[in-house]
Amino acid sequence: MQRRRFLGVLGAGTLGLAAATPATAELEYTETDVRIESFDGTEIAATLFEPAKPGRYPVVLGTHGWGGSRSASIGRNYAPRGYVVLSYDSRGFGESEGEVGVDGPKEVADVSALIDWLEGREKVRVEGENGASVGMIGGSYAGGIQLNAAAVDDRIEAIVPRIAWHDLNYSLQPNGVVKTVWGTGLYGVGIAGSRTRVVAEDSSTETRVNDASRGIDPAVHRSYAEGIALNGYSQPSQAFFAARSPYHKMDELDVPALFVQGWTDHLFVPNEAIWNFEAFRNRGRDAKLIMYNGGHAQIPVDSDPQQAESARDEATRAWLAEHLDSRDDASVDAVFDDHDVLVYESQTERMRGANAIPQRNAETVELDLSEGASIPEDAVGASLVGNTVAPTANSYVVSESFDGATSVAFEFDASDAFGLDDGQQADLLTVPEIDLQVRTLGTEATLFFRVTHVSEDGEETHINDNVTPLRIEDTPEAVHTETLELIAFQRYVSSGDTLRLVIDSTDSGFNSARESAGAIVEHDSTLRIPGVTVLDGSVV
């Protein structure tokens, strides 16, 4: 179907939730496993939850993460609140038939077929030509299908994508560098979660291999092989992932969206949710953004405090109530306190409001790398980042982050960088950028950029364990100029602290350059930090 036409930074304190959505009397409900025939005859396995009380209700539709299967939790959370809920196994996973297509056209058509089926239910509210009133929730793979399906089916009236992507090519091959560890993990989980889970126990090895290969779209097998063998994806593979990415469907996505993203997500990094949110806002769409402590991570992170969990849960419930049922007790504004963004602060363990990331109407600070270079006395205006091929640096694959054998560091005194007097702090709610000048020692080079906060007493924190890769292909020794966006973060820095930019040639989570001795980073490069607010006093 076609679509139809912190509280503040200064002195605002922590986010209060006393005015959040009031509790309503819970309804009794029924729970039934069903099998629904999709557009092409493929059977989709699902569980239907319906309030027992007579009436017609809006719909909440949800699926699961990559390689997983449906959960009863969304039904048990939302059916008592007055929704018909359908929790389903995505095509090819769990008990559903078919081939896994990575939230592609067939998965999108499945969503429409499921809504068609729901419209025939006695307890589903159908409003004339508009059809059923449907909201979708879920994370990761279940977040991606919301954005792809809502671009096509206008019956989807509210979405809550959690830890979802903006551009799968960036997710899997950011700035041209293949995510080796994540790619391998996803490939294995995808195969294990598709047809191999239901193959007969006495099947031959040949049968099992053939079944595994047929369980997932051949493009997935091809792209994984290319990443390992060729150190990058072919044009057909890139086109496959682009077709499943929301970034080029934004003009069709006229649906209220609550984006929920984790600061410590290393698969779909914070920037992807920010890009989705900004694309919606720039088109005048109704959108909000919540940044919490979590996401896809190779190693465990501390869980969110209760306040952050409450904010996410209350916002989701209020979002569905407001956009699906126009309920008087829907309290989106109460949860967000008239802000567009809620941000978790790891140093204070609290949520706070903001107008955007980077914070608008805040200062942009530019730092000349030559001012922060830690270099030998005989080095003149540039630093060599030698390529070790085998990774010697680590950002997130193991618990301790460490720099590589040939890394270079640029250190900036917070007092000088942000103009801090004693007792002042700078609030950095930022998406940093580097105006980079670099020369490759060979036809290509990979560089990895991470930001570390060093407190006055010497404690080092690699912020969110995130790293930004960059692959450069150019004529050897030619000066290559590029503006590179780094991973977004929030951090308080005090006078006496240091902000350190580290550049490596390798990282344990990624492929490395195979035809290069490294790169020479010119000190005539600039680190730009937007969203800086100087605070009189200390928050942490």
Image (spheres, rainbow, N blue to C red):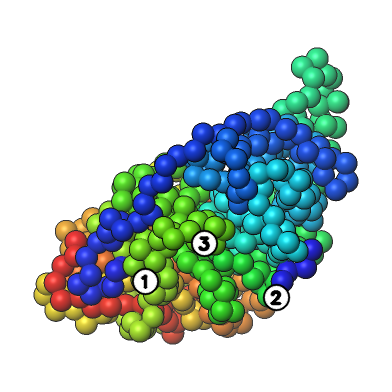
Question: Residue 338 bears which disc, if any?
Answer: 1
Whole-angstrom CA distance, mark 1 to mark 2, is 27 Å
Disc 1 vs disc 2: which is toward the camera? 2
Q: Earlier in the sequence, mark 3 or mark 2?
A: 2
Query: Which amino acid does the dot numbered 1 rest on?
Result: Asp
Mark 1 falls on what kind of element? Answer: loop
Query: Which amino acid does the dot numbered 3 rest on?
Result: Ser
Say above or below: 484 vs 132.
below
Disc 3 vs disc 1: which is toward the camera? 3
* Nearer to me, 514 or 435: 435
* Residue labelled with disc 2: 5
Tell which residue pokes out farthest to the left in this image: 422
401 vs 236, left or right, is left
Q: Earlier in the sequence, mark 1 or mark 2?
A: 2
Whole-angstrom CA distance, mark 3 to mark 2, is 19 Å
| Quadrant in the rendering for residue 254 | bottom right
Q: Earlier in the sequence, mark 3 or mark 1?
A: 3
- Point out the image quarter for the N terminus: bottom right
Q: Residue at x 41, y 58 (%)?
A: 329
* Nearer to me, 456 or 42: 42
Q: Residue at x 31, y 46 (%)?
A: 306
* Residue labelled with disc 3: 326
